[in-house]
Amino acid sequence: MASSSSYSSLYLHSLPKTSSGSGQWKNGFLGGSVSSRRLFASPVVFLQKSPRLSAIRASSEGGSRRRVYKESQAATGFPNAKVQQIASSVLPIGSFVVVTFVLWKVVEKFMSPKSSSPGEGKASTQGVKWSIGAGTNLLQGFAAKVDREAKQRLNEFAKELRAFRSVDMSGCNFGDEGLFFLAESLGYNQTLEEVSFSANGITAAGVKAFDGVLQSNIMLKVLNLSRNPIGDEGVKTLCVTLMENCSIEKLQLNSTDLGDEGAKEIAELLKRNSTLRVIELNNNMIDYSGFTSLAGALLENNTIRHLHLNGNYGGALGANALAKGLEGNKSLRELHLHGNSIGDEGIRALMAGLSSHKGKLALLDLGNNSITAKGAFYVAEYIKRSKSLVWLNLYMNDIGDEGAEKVADALKQNRSIATIDIGGNNIHATGVNAIAQALKDNAIVTTLEVGYNPIGPDGAKALSEILKFHGNIKTLKLGWCQIAAKGAEYVADMLRYNNTISVLDLRANGLRDEGASCLARSLKVVNEALTSVDLGFNEIRDDGAFAIAQALKANEDVTVTSINLGNNFITKFGQSALTDARDHVLEMTEKEVEIFF
């Protein structure tokens, strides 16, 4: 009986109530009537594993104990069946809930920012922060750090603006927001005279930062906003601001997406502003209409000194319009029109306007304008009459030998031009010989650029024979002229006697070791003028390097301070010899010679 009571105490506490005489168990939880035999499997298999059940079966007692066991067995079938019924209903629902919860957490992790408690000391991220500033679209945790560093840098920039006379902030890429921050430092600034905000991603919206600031600044003289896409709208805003400025003398707006409308605004500014001296509008999109507007401004403005319009789209019509403005202008000293496709007809009109110009133009840049020998004739006629022109650029046109001869004839009469560039004009030996003859009795020209012309050895010979004892050339540029080793021999012989040439450029002429050796022999001779020699791109090898090294060691009174041998075929042995020669010169003469490999 002891085992029977123990068994009953194990199960009776969990037995549900029964209804008398029904032979069925009533499910009080679900309120239904269930047959245990039909719906649920017998739980005997579980009881067989119980030590307590084994003891009951092994008992030798009679039928009464067997009845207790059978009743207990029948009673235990209900709760196990009940559990299975509930499990079969709950399990799918629970699985769905669990899977949904897990998926929701995964989606939340990728779609929503993680948040940390304030006590953890970690910056929380709140999605993606988009910015137009430099460095940019970062998660806020990183953006906060970038913002702190950016503000720190801007504060340092602001201090510089207040402390120095000249500040260069080009390429800092601080954008419109940065300019608004820095502009405050310009108001009533009594120190800063020159500032460059070039290449900082400033747009038309950022230019508004100057409103109310530049009007109150009386010290700033140079403002550079080049390489910022401010466009015509930004130029308009700036011009309205500068109408009331009385200090800025130089305004640089190169590569700012400025077109005809922007040029029109600049023209209106020039009509009213009397302090601007230099306007730079290079590499923009100014066409004939814009040139016409600027020409009209030149008729009314008598303070502008330098006008830069390189790399625009003036063409012949633009040059013709500009010529009319030049006729009535008295102040212009420099006119830069490089790369405007002016052509011969445009040059004819422009030279006519300059001939009637009442001022004293000193610099004229006509490079890369499709000028031929016909156009060179008009240029030559202007050169003959000009008494103020000092610097003339005809680089990268196509005047040829015929045009070079016309320019040479003009140089014989001109006594003002000191620098002339006729490089890249398809000039051969005949044309350069004419130029050389013009220099024979001309002591005014000091810089001659003949590079990128196929003058060959004969051209080098014609020029060298004149410059050996005549002329006053201090800078001679003969790069890419195909003079070869033979031409280098003529140049080397000229250097033995010439006492004026200080800078000599012989790049890319195929000199090789033979030409380098010829020049080295001349370096052994005392030349009190020559200080810089450029021999880059000449296929020079170690033998040529050795010859130059020996020449430097042999000349105790060497005046050369710079030799460029870059882009040749000199190995470490030749480089070592040149380094030893440089050290020797320093030790013996205390003079430093820079040698570039």
Image (cartoon, rainbow, N blue to C red):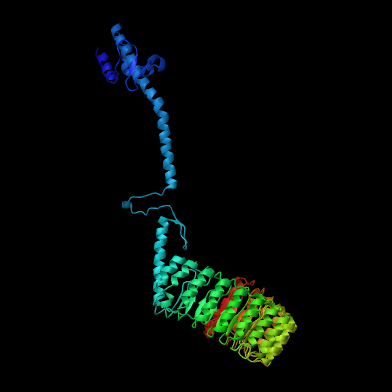
- Residue 363, given in percent of the width and then of the height, sits at 60, 84
Between 57 and 21, the one nearer to me in the picture: 21
Between 346 and 160, the one nearer to me in the picture: 346
Query: Can residue 128 be seen here?
Result: yes
State the residue lying farthest toward the bottom.
441
Query: Can residue 311 be seen here?
Result: no
Write the residue at 61% across / 77% down: 292
Figure quadrant of residue 318: bottom right
- Residue 447, given in percent of the width and then of the height, sits at 62, 85
State the residue lying farthest toward the top.
62
- Residue 185, given in percent of the width and then of the height, sits at 40, 73
Q: In this picture, is 72 found above or below 158?
A: above
Between 57 and 134, the one nearer to me in the picture: 134
- In which quadrant is the N terminus drawn? top left
Figure quadrant of residue 13: top left
Between 162 and 465, the one nearer to me in the picture: 162
Q: In this picture, is 314 found above or below 448?
A: above
Q: In this picture, is 65 found above or below 86?
A: above
- Residue 591, given in percent of the width and then of the height, sits at 53, 84
Total of numbered circles in the picture? 0
Q: In this picture, is 357 found above or below 65?
A: below
- In which quadrant is the C terminus drawn? bottom right
Left or right: where does residue 118 sit relative to residue 262? left
Figure quadrant of residue 396: bottom right
